[in-house]
């Protein structure tokens, strides 16, 4: 069967979509290859959130175009957010593209590929109609809540997920499960409501079942995905039932969080969903969720985070700005004060919770004073990290129509760098506070040593900086399979960074702090991948905790 190359750009939601596409096409007999040169079908799963992400995809489309012009027979498909945002315009401007499929229509992808393959192999090249080449939602997904729910074929795609090594990240034993799709928040800068459509909530039974099957396939960590996960809310008995199954349901909107549900209805809230998965699938040792919305984040969710040991103490909850004026222009629906109150409530209720977020600099009309408000927010709150983005005007958003992109790029760049430096100092403080503690680390990757030419420079730099520790502790395997810490003497420990001269096993704490442990050999480091071990934190850097080394006999 035809070899397929699939490249993914953008967020975790896109990664999950790609996994589902891979499963769906593999079931139909397609074979996936790692080299685009070997592929008969090339698919790009694209991202539209910032212009830069789109540019990357366009350059890939250009490369395939050249190959096709040189006579190669390739089916080129653009799937994901760019397909939805650009619509048929993309087909007109890039004739080398054979098919397009938006993120809300991925169940129709096999048909589109089949159409394109059959056309290319026909003796007389047939011309496909636009409908035979594209599957885009347009505005359909916002037309009516019940209609959209009944027509929701994507639920079938989520349900038909293959539970193999691929879906649990191979040795990494980490998987993702969607709980909501789309978004109803309409932040003025954001293209997601236009590309992914209305907020659709999956039935809790389907989500729990998916988690159970992933756990049975070997997943130790599950991340629940949604654009605004804490707004998950499923009203039972309301959605249309398709083939005797519960259907996914359009989100109720913000008013649902203002009052208690009517006594007659049975609702599953996000807090209840989280607790159900925690209690009913205890094989999942780490249960995460991203992304949270700073508005209407109830204490009920914080209580579940505090009380359920397998729910990770981590919140990715983007502030976007520290200025009330800019937050209003962004249509975020909360003030800086409300954001700070929430984070303080979380820190008070959930011991050791780690906070991360996203920030946009250079939003239209942002003044030095607005920017200073953002800087002070990043100094004031213990963010473990923030992803910082320069505002990028996106077609299809409210902001591009309403506001001129009036902050010069040089100013955006300067603000970006200034904020990165402030964040680095905040991160340094947050990470340093963990030194001396023993934590569970879920190892997911191995980092190779740097080549020998650089080694000497690297080592001397570290020695000069005086970062070597004099005591190193080695972990011990406990009966339960996790590792207990035993203090041992050791000659030396090393500074952890990407330029290290040793093999390193890299993992994360429950709060998503990145950790690294040295190993004498590659195989010792590899053995840690997919395992949760109790480790001692010896030192820290702004974005890294340095752990005790892994003993060779581990
Ligand atoms: N420009 C810059 N950053 C953006 N983001 C979303 N839209 C834009 C845009 N138009 C950022 C937000 C969001 C993250 C995923 O991407 O910070 O939280
Ligand atoms: Fe975009 Fe705002 Fe929805 Fe997040 S909450 S996906 S930023 S519209």
Image (cartoon, grey):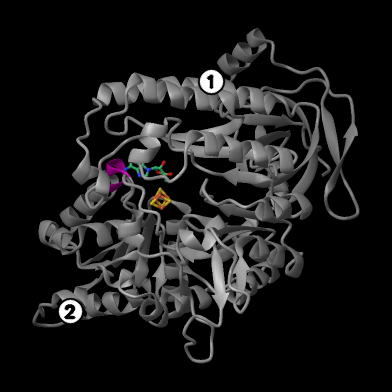
Displayed quadrant of residue 278:
bottom right
| Secondary structure beneath label 1 | helix
Labels 1 & 2 near each other (Cβ < 8 A): no
Q: Specify the farthest residue to the top.
A: 464
Displayed quadrant of residue 541:
top right
Displayed quadrant of residue 174:
bottom right
- In the image, taking residue 551 as reference, residue 266 lies left or right, namely left
Task: Determine the residue positioned at 31% across, 65% down.
Answer: 102
Q: Would you place residue 363 above or below residue 346 in this image?
A: above
Q: Would you place residue 325 above or below residue 232 in this image?
A: above
Label of residue 454 in the image = 1
Task: Determine the residue positioned at 62% across, 11% down.
Answer: 460
Comparing labels 1 and 2, the label whose residue is closer to the camera: 2
> For the magenta stretch, what is the residue range?
50-54
- In the image, taking residue 187 as reference, residue 383 lies left or right, namely right
Relative image position of residue 110 (x, y in whole percent): 34, 77
Q: Which residue is mark 2?
A: 119
Label of residue 546 in the image = none
- In the image, taking residue 66 as reference, residue 514 lies left or right, namely right
Residue 44 visible from this viewpoint:
no
Query: Quick check: is 37 in the magenta stretch?
Result: no
């Amino acid at each position: 069967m035809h070899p397929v190359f699939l490249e993914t750009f953008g967020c975790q939601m896109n990664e999950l979509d790609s996994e589902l596409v891979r499963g769906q096409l593999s079931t139909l007999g397609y074979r996936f290859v790692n080299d685009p040169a070997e592929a008969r079908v090339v698919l790009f799963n694209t991202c539209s959130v910032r212009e830069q992400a789109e540019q990357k995809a366009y350059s890939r489309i250009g490369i395939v175009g050249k190959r096709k012009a040189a006579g190669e027979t390739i089916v080129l498909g653009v799937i994901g957010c760019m397909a939805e945002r650009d619509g048929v315009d993309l087909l007109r401007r890039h004739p080398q593209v054979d098919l397009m499929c938006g993120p809300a229509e991925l169940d129709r992808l096999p048909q589109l590929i089949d159409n394109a393959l059959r056309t290319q192999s026909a003796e007389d090249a047939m011309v496909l109609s636009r409908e035979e080449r594209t599957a885009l939602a347009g505005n359909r997904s916002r037309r009516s809540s019940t209609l959209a729910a009944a027509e929701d074929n994507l639920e079938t795609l989520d349900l038909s997920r293959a539970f193999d090594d691929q879906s649990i990240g191979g040795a990494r034993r980490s998987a993702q499960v969607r709980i909501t799709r789309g978004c109803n928040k309409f932040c003025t800068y954001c293209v997601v409501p236009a590309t992914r459509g209305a907020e659709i909530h999956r039935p809790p039974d389907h989500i729990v079942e998916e988690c159970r099957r992933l756990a049975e396939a070997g997943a130790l960590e599950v991340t629940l995905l949604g654009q605004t996960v804490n707004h998950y809310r499923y009203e039972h008995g309301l959605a249309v039932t398709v083939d005797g199954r519960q259907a996914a349901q359009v989100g109720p909107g913000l008013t649902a969080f203002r009052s208690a549900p009517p006594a007659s209805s049975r609702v599953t809230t996000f807090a209840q969903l989280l607790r159900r998965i925690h209690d009913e699938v205890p094989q999942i040792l780490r249960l995460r969720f991203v992304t949270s919305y700073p508005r209407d984040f109830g204490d009920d969710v914080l209580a579940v985070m505090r009380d359920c040991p397998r729910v990770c103490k981590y919140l990715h909850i983007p502030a976007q700005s520290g200025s009330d004026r800019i937050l209003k222009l962004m249509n975020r629906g909360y003030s800086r004060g409300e954001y700070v109150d929430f984070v303080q409530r979380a820190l008070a209720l959930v011991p050791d919770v780690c906070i991360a977020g996203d920030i946009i600099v250079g939003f239209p009309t942002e003044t030095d004073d607005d920017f200073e408000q953002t800087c002070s927010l990043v100094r004031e709150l213990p963010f473990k990290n923030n992803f910082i983005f320069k505002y990028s005007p996106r077609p299809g958003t409210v902001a591009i129509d309403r506001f001129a992109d009036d902050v010069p790029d040089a100013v955006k760049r300067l603000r970006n760098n200034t904020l990165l430096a402030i964040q680095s100092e905040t991160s340094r403080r947050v990470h340093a506070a963990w030194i001396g503690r023993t934590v569970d680390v879920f190892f997911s990757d191995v980092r190779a040593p740097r080549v020998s030419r650089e080694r000497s420079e690297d080592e001397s730099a570290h020695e000069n900086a005086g970062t070597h520790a004099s005591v190193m502790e080695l972990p011990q395997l406990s009966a339960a399979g996790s590792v207990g810490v035993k203090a041992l003497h050791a000659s030396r420990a090393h500074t952890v960074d990407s330029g290290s001269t040793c093999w390193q096993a890299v993992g994360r704490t429950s709060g998503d702090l990145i950790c690294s442990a040295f190993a004498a050999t590659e195989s010792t480091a590899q053995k840690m991948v997919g395992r949760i071990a109790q480790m001692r934190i010896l030192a820290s850097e702004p974005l890294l905790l340095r752990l005790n080394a892994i003993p060779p006999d581990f």
